[in-house]
Image: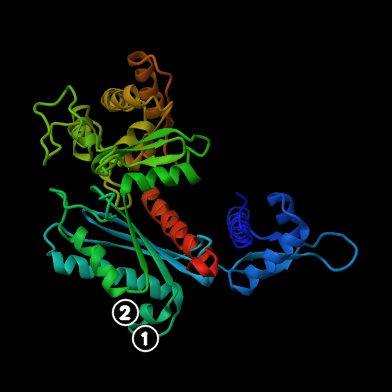
Amino acid sequence: MPASPSTARAINDRLALRLLQQEGPLTAGRLKQLTGLSRPTVADLVERLTASGLVTVVGESGEQRRGPNARVYGIVADRAHLAALDVRTEGVSVVVSDLVGDVLAEASVPIGGDTGTGPAVEQAVALVERVAKEAGTLGAAPPRELVRGWGRLHTVGIGAPGLIDPATGELRDSSGLPAWHRRLVAALQERLPEARVLVENETNLAALAEQRDGVARDRDTFVLLWLGHGTGAAVVLDGALRRGASGGTGEIGFLPVPGTTTLPSATDCEGGFHSLAGAAAVAALAAEFGVSAEPDAHEPHAAALVRHAVAAPGTPGAAGFLDALADRLAIGAASVTAVLDPGCVVLGGEVGRAGGAALAARVERRLARMSPLPTEVRASTLGGGAVLRGALLTARDGAQDELFAPPSSR
């Protein structure tokens, strides 16, 4: 059955908006070329989108041609502002951007382990309000009143460790994670009632970022192995992120592996892959080989140790440390590839990025010996920053799905 005129218009409008998002400002002629639509159809959709406030004239093409230069159309970037949060056990980072993804303001706040749930939630929410204020205006109104009255903080994307309930989209209660993580989501929704709040597992967001902007841009099937404070994995098959029946796809920290002294339990991943590749385990392994690194406030200690070993391979113990770490990572990677055959594993998180090509090559060689399935191993180019990037992409997608919808469906 052919699409109705209104449905066809909605499809064409979304297509044009996506192209403007991906390619940047375009002339009507270029939109015609990219969409394959007729000139009158493109003229109509440009008029509709301009009238709706989603698109505006941002310049002229400057081409040498008869008559006036062609107008260049672009998305109205400040139609909506977006916030992204990276929620860790030790603190929160926040970024606010416009609708096309340009960062307007960002900040972080540490939250100590001895901070109570209420104060921790208040610190995190206050940070979001402050960053939103800096992004929106320099006025002197109180942050809470300012953000509510601003009306343009459309969507908030949150990346957090733990399981996301696929039925409700909420962060599930997970042992070992601070109680303020779950309370934060409800507090943000209460303090920012006009904003839509989306929550996703941090590793899944990192995979989304690597797929869109990182080393997996050319892959529609891959596995991201998250190497940070803890361990995790994200699975992308045929271009789609797979979450599993309970939202637990990729909880590789609980994977029983050789080399540990015990087995993980339903409430504790100690004894699983986490015990081999988590930050504490990486630091302990480096100490065994005599590898050390100066503390860096901008980088987790485990990542600094790996980066130091890669940068100074002649340092005593450096090569042995990297080899031993690759042995451990290959165990987890081999378990995943044996089941999924993704063809590509990305070493993500701060440790994966710090290891770079040197660590990735070591893991790839070991996988080639352990499995008949050809698997390329790549190092993340985004590292820990992939979570914020993925949260921002998720927020932008959510906002655009609503803003770009035809008026009758909103």
Q: Which amino acid does label 2 sit on?
A: Arg
Q: Nearer the viewer, mark 1 or mark 2?
A: 2
Residue 406, quarter of the rendered image: bottom right
Crowd class of label 1 (few under 14; some 14 to 19; many from 20; radius 10 Å): few
Residue bearing mark 2: 144
Asked which secondary structure carries label 2, the reply is helix
Q: Can residue 395 be seen in this view?
A: yes
Near-viewer residue (383 or 47): 47
* Image coordinates for residue 237, horizontal then vertical, percent: 42, 35
Q: Can residue 318 be seen in this view?
A: no
Residue located at (20% from left, 52% from top): 172
Q: How many marks?
A: 2
Q: Mark number for residue 141?
A: 1
18 displayed left or right of 108 = right
Q: How far apart are marks 1 and 2 (CA)?
A: 8 Å
Crowd class of label 2 (few under 14; some 14 to 19; many from 20; radius 10 Å): some
* Image coordinates for residue 87, horizontal then vertical, percent: 28, 56
Asked which secondary structure carries label 1, the reply is loop
Protein image colouring: rainbow
